[in-house]
Image (cartoon, grey):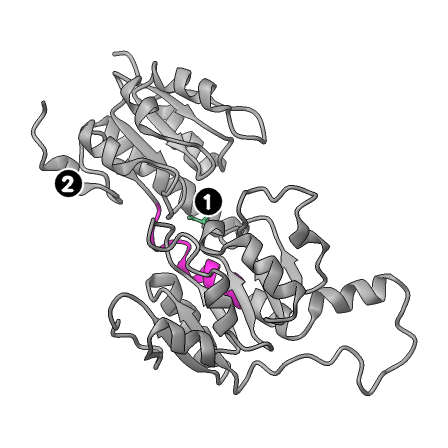
Amino acid sequence: MTKPNVFVTRHLPDAALDMLRQACDLEIWPDELPPPYDTLKAKAATVDGLLTLLSDQIDQELLHSAPQLRVVSQCAVGYDNIDVAAATAAHIPVGHTPGVLTDTTADFAFALLMAAARRIEEAARYVHAGKWRTWGPTLLMGQDVWGATLGIIGMGRIGQAMARRGRGFNMRVLYTDAVPVPNDAGAAYTPLDNLLAQADFVSLHVPLTPETHHLIDRRALKLMKSSAVLINTARGPVVDPQALYAALAAGEIAYAALDVTDPEPIPPDDPLLTLANCLIVPHIASSSVRTRTKMAVMAAENLLAGLAGKPLPYCVNPAVYNTAED
Ligand code: DGY
């Protein structure tokens, strides 16, 4: 029996690729950079399954030119790079990897919070530059984390995990979301503007949607304290980068710690990179060996289920199973 054809858009941990090799004819894009859109579209036109990353654009045009495609499996929890409505209309289930990266991502968001509060990057640069000459009574004084107010925007799985970390550090935790979310972290619901005005640390945990695009804009930044820190491990476009640059440069907020940028990767001449009060790392919040391996295995499970005509264990568009074939 011929095996289904699958295109995997980047090299993944072997545990996942081994699962796929047993059941599929695999082609793995060999480069570190994503396949160009036209290449991806040409590959999609000939395969039964696609295993994608968040840097692959899966739009209506690509889906329409993929007559055999039976499943798109994304190796990430976020899927704003995929036109899910178009996939549903084309009866193609889309998989993702929820849950498995929650604590790893929250750990990293909290690490960014700590790094910002205690000036860790700046302090390391100071030592490397040979400037450390003695114990200084006012040297590199930072902000206390304990006793400070953490404001969480988006109280989903990762937001709640961040709230628990905040409580563990004796912070007061506020959150905002579309509606109050029962949570075990003792976090108090408050409207967005109040959270922005009260928080010492604002951490973003919303998905990227038309509603959250540039949620943190000039107006939002102006509501924040001049001593406040913004942490973004969600998606770059949730923050208006020009407004953020203006706020940081003018000292309207104190610091930003960003795991995600708009665009990604951030161009080397982006003005945000000129600022000493902006820490930027390359979208690695979920990047622990264990978690990235689990994500890849979940993505393989989704892909294999889709190819076998079974419901995906972690499906973004379960409505696909209710729609009759056209
Ligand atoms: C996701 O999964 O959406 C993260 O941004 C990458 O791990």
- Determine whether 16 is above or below 169 in the image: above
Q: CA distance from mark 1 to mark 2?
A: 28 Å
| Residue at the image position 13 percent from the left and 36 percent from the top | 321
- Determine whether 253 is above or below 214 in the image: below
Quarter of the figure with the N terminus: top left
Is residue 109 rendered magenta in the image?
A: yes
Q: Position of residue 144 (x, y in %)?
A: 61, 83
Residue 226 appears anywhere in the view: yes
Q: Position of residue 173 (x, y in %)?
A: 42, 80
Q: Nearer the viewer, residue 8 or 145?
A: 145
**Crowd around label 1: few <14 · some 14–19 · many ≥20 (10 Å):** some
Is residue 61 rendered magenta in the image?
A: no
Q: Which residue is mark 1?
A: 293
The residue carrying mark 1 has its beta carbon less than 8 Å from ligand 1: no
Q: Which residue is mark 2?
A: 319
Horizontal side, residue 122 vs residue 240: left or right:
right
Query: For the magenta stretch, what is the residue range?
Result: 97-110
